[in-house]
Amino acid sequence: MSAEKPQYEWSALWQGMTGVFSLAGLVMCASFLGFGALVRGMGYDVWPALLTTAIIWALPGQVILLTLAEEGAGLLATALAVSFTAIRLLPMVTLVLARSALPGTSKTPLYFLAHFIAVTLWVLTEEKVKEMPRERRLPWLTGLGCCLMVIMLGMNVAGFYLTGVLPPIVAAALAFMSPCFFFISLFSNAQGRADYFAIAAGVLLLPFCMELVPDYDLAVAGLAGGTLAYVAGRSRRVPA
Amino acid sequence: MSEETFNLLILIIVAGGLATYVWRALGVYAAQKLNPNGELFHWLGCVATAIVAALCVKLALAPPDILKETLLVTRLGAYAAGIAVYYTLSNAPAGVAAAFATMIAVEEVVRPIF
C-alpha cells in the first residue's frame, strides 16, 4: 500500500476569515477608504476603484494606473509603470508559498492564492501561520485573502461616497492618506543604503522627468533613479 | 458603453491586471526555481522603490482635483510630519495618522492666519 497523498484541509478556509481582525487589516481598511476618496477626487466613477481593487490588488499600482489614465498616457507607458511597482509582489508570493504550499499537490490553488498576495497577506502569514498544521495553511490564507478583498471593495465604496458628504478638507486629507502611507512605507521597508538612494533619486528626478518626458515620467524616473541607486548601493557594498 | 469607458476598461485589465499578475505568477514559479535574493531582484526592487517615491512627489506637485484647494506646502508638510512621527515612534500607522491630522491642521488653523 502506497503512502497517503498529501491533501489540503479546505475546512480552514472559513477560519482564515478571522485573520482580518488585526492591526494590518485596520491599516489596510484606512488605505482603501482613502483610495475610494482619491478615485472620486480624480473625477472618476466608483467602478474603476472597484475594478482596480479586484484585479490589481496592490494600491500603488492602482493609483499609478488611474493617475496616468487621467492624463491620457498610453497603454505601454502605463503598463510599464504599473508593472515595475508590482515586482515587489514576486518575492512576497515566493515567501508566502514557501510557508504554505504542500509539495506534491496540484499547482492550481497556488496560482489562485497568488492573486491575493500583497504586503498585508505576507505580514499576516509571518504572524499567524507558523503554528498551524501545514495542510491548513494555504486554505486559511485563501479564505483570508478573499475576505479581505470583499471588505476592501466595501471600503472603496464607503470612501467614494463619504467624500461627497465630508467637509472638503477632510475629504482631501482622506484622499491623501494613501500617498502618505506609500511614502512612509518606503522608509519602513528600506533595508539598505540602496533603498534610501532609490527614494532620494525618485524624489529628485521626478520634477525633471515631468518637464522632459511627461508621458513616461514615472517609468523614466524609476528606471534611471532605481538603476543609479542600485549601482551606488552596490559600489558601497563591494569596495573595489 | 462609451469609447472612453471601453478604453479605461481595457487599460485596467491589460496595463493593470496582466502587468501585475505576471509577477505573482513568476513568484509561484520562483518558489520552485529562482533565487529572489539575487542581484536581478535587488535591481528590480530599487526601480520599484524609485517609481513609488516618484509617484508620491508627483501627487504632491501635480495633485488630483480633490487636493487642488490645498497648498503645495501643506501636502509636503503632511509627508514631512508623517515621516517625522514614523521615525519618532517607529510606528507606520501613527505616521499616517499624523500626516492626516497635519493636512487638516495646516489648512484650517495655520493658513487662515496668513
Image (cartoon, coloured by chain):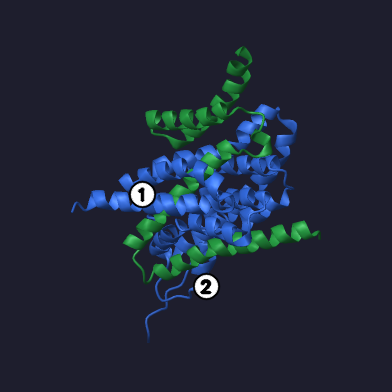
The reply, left or right, for residue B13 in relation to residue A239 is: right
For the point 70% across and 29% down, the residue is A168
Residue B89's spot in the image, x, y percent? Answer: 39, 29
Q: What colour is chain A?
A: blue
Which chain contains the residue that carries disc 1?
A
In what element is the residue under mark 2?
helix
Q: Residues within 10 Å of mark 1 (few under 14, many from 20)?
A: many
Q: Secondary structure at mark 1?
A: helix
- In the foreground, A25 or B77: B77
Would residue A18 be seen by someone viewing this image from the given angle?
A: no
A152 left or right, relative to A198: right
Where residue B70 sits, quadrant-wise, is top right
| Amino acid at circle 1 | Ala
**Could you say which disc has been placed on residue A108 in the image?**
2
**Colour of the chain lettered B:** green
Q: Residue at x 37, y 85 (%)?
A: A2
